[in-house]
Image: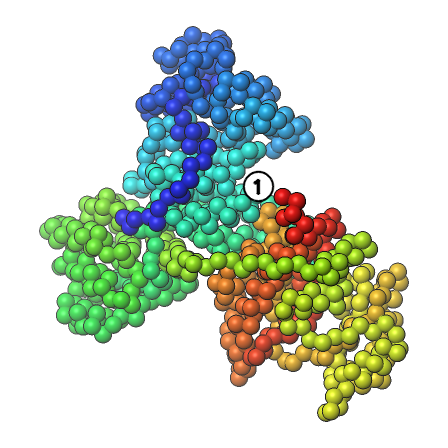
Amino acid sequence: MNPIEGHLPTRSPLHDILAPTGIVVIGASSDPTKRGYKAMVGLVKDGYKGDIYPVNPKADMILGIKAWPSVTAVPGNPQLALICTPAATVPALIAECGRRGIKGAIILASGFAETGEEGAALEREMMARAEAHGVRIIGPNTSGVFNLHHRINLLALDNVKAGDVGIISQSGNMLLSLALEAQHNGQVGFSTYVGPGNQSDIGFNDYLRYLGEDENTRVAALYVEGFRDGGKFLQVARDVTAMKPVVVYKSGSTEQGQKAASSHTGALAGSYAMTVDLLRQAGVSVVQYSDEILPVAEGLGLLQKARGKRVAVISDGGGQATIASDRLAEAGLELAELSEATRARLREILIPQASTVNPVDVAGSTDAHPSLLATCMEIVAEDDNVDSVFLVGMFGGYSIRFAESLLGDEMRGAEAMVDLSRATTKPLVIYSLYTPIKPPALRRLHEAGLPIYASIEQSVRVLAALGERGQYLAQHRGQAPETAVESKPALSALFAQAQAEGRDLFEYEAKQLLRDHGIDVPLELVVRSEEELVEAAARFRGAAGDTPLAMKVVSRDILHKSDAGGVKLNLLGEQALRQARAEILDACRAYDPEADIEGLLVTPMARKGVEVIVGVIRDPIFGPVLMFGLGGIFVEILEDVAFRSIPLTRHDACSMVEQIKAKKVLSGVRGEPAVDKEALVDLLLAVSRIVEAYPQLSELDLNPVIAHADGYAVVDARVIVDRARSTTKADEEADI
């Protein structure tokens, strides 16, 4: 095992609830079909060392333990109550628990907000009682809790063992699936499990902080259907992932996606892809499939991280070496380039037919000497170009496939691999065909803390998670988010005026916002009359003649100017401007006769380049989120975009530019020059700072931004105003 970075130095109140010295079971029962019976069995059978107080007015003893008629009658100092009674009884019981000094309550019952308004009213009553009496709530509608290191097993699961994987799951069946998988695996154990249920009080962020603090947890694994407060979760995740790995399987899309988006960014926000990007920004390892949760959690728990993404593959079969190479490339990993010295050492011990380029194919060299695989692993692990070592093939099965006499040599190879794992910080990951039958050599490796997998795909996902985590830790140390700029009174006044008039910022106002905060915006003029049109034509007439111009309608009522015929391009001279003005006004009046037309925006045509989009949305779950991708008309067609939570670090901005699939276009294709990526990074950071300074900004679309080899040009800008929010950031801070 590689050491973890550490534990969070804080101690949340959840420790008293999830590791209590006394537990009250309200609704304890002798009926095996009841949850109150299962909870009692779990506590008694697992040997809970604290005090157990069954509460049932109709029983004197339950499972040999004295029962009490009410919570009030319970002696001692219990810290946790498990409520196994129907939903309607819960509010009164919560008040009784509070008066008794009980700090936390687990509520198993359903029938609350998940059932409709009547249930929601009951949940509100429950929370009012909880807040009045100082009781923290787990659930309701929860599958329960266990803390195996404290012998608390309120689910009475008999197929789980204590270990270092902490689980938070909104699905009880998902927990059962993981427990059965761990039982089959034989080596994976759990520290704490919590079913968050409705998260009426305690949410994912609270549970994750607890696991980050818990000394018995090396890795946190979460199954999430929906976050209650995504912003807080991301903050906690950043703190925890700096100490230990966090694995998340997110089902579906963001629970409260944008229902009525008014911008390109709004249309794409609230997606599953956005959630994944934001989680990864916080250092979370996101798995795509449910059968990856436990393998990745186990691998990260044992190995923690890799220095980078360069993998050396050692295989005893060419076909599997090829498959491994394909999967590694698909996962964003790379085959390490072995040094000549490393290859020379390999040639000394392998037969001539073997390949010593990566992937290393031993080509029969190990048929009679399987321990040679361990020697190969040691050699490549010493290469400075290698970050992780991946053994692929039939190790563990040589004595089965060829001859029983090979078992001794195979066990010697296993011991050598164990020694290597303790001597190196580079992860050793092993895939074997024989993993399902657990031969002695593989059992020895697994017992020693080497992860053994039954598929190349699972192995590669673990290697990817290790590389991603190592890079995240290296890149984010010392990286601070960009600080917000100070809001400017004149710009705050623009927002106030727009709010008063019930509109969004006009394009020229949006560009003024950008320009005043250091973003490069081309010169533009608003034309409201024939006289102003003549002045504009003269203003843009240079020594070389007329400059090609663009003309766009400015109207609070016309959101998509092109759809309304409100855009004319490549206009040369005053006459062309006059004609374009007339045509735009006619088209827009036909499109919306009631539209209030402020005027026409005239600006020079942008030089040819690569169209990108920069957008911002205030997501209802995660707060302000920035988007970057290929722009123009293709943004919603291709959906090739990257998301990050605001505020950004410089690394966040750089990674956005490098993440999109169309990044090759930014690097120059078909003779076109590469764009200035650093200028785009600076633009993203500038937008991040602006958004923090103006809370009245609800959405922002810069589409397109034309990226050039020597900078960029913001061609179109939209700022959607939050009609209900009128205070500036400075005002908010003054009120706090």
Above/below status of 645 relative to 128: below
Is residue 732 at all visible to an observer of this figure?
yes
Q: Is residue 276 left or right of residue 578?
A: left
Give the camera-side residue of 204 and 683.
683
Counting from the top left corner in percent of width and height, residue 111 is at 60, 27
Above/below status of 273 relative to 163: below
Residue most extreme to the bottom: 544
Q: Is residue 615 left or right of residue 368?
A: right
If the image is split into quadrants, where does the C terminus sit?
A: top right
Q: Residues within 10 Å of mark 1 (few under 14, many from 20)?
A: many
- Quadrant of the image occupied by residue 132: top right
Tell me the kind of residue under disc 1: Arg
- Residue, x 76% and y 55% (percent of image)? 496
- Residue, x 69% and y 60% (percent of image)? 488
Above/below status of 186 relative to 526: above
Above/below status of 173 relative to 348: above
Q: Is residue 658 left or right of residue 1?
A: right
Counting from the top left corner in percent of width and height, residue 662 is at 53, 70
Which residue has dot 1 on it?
228
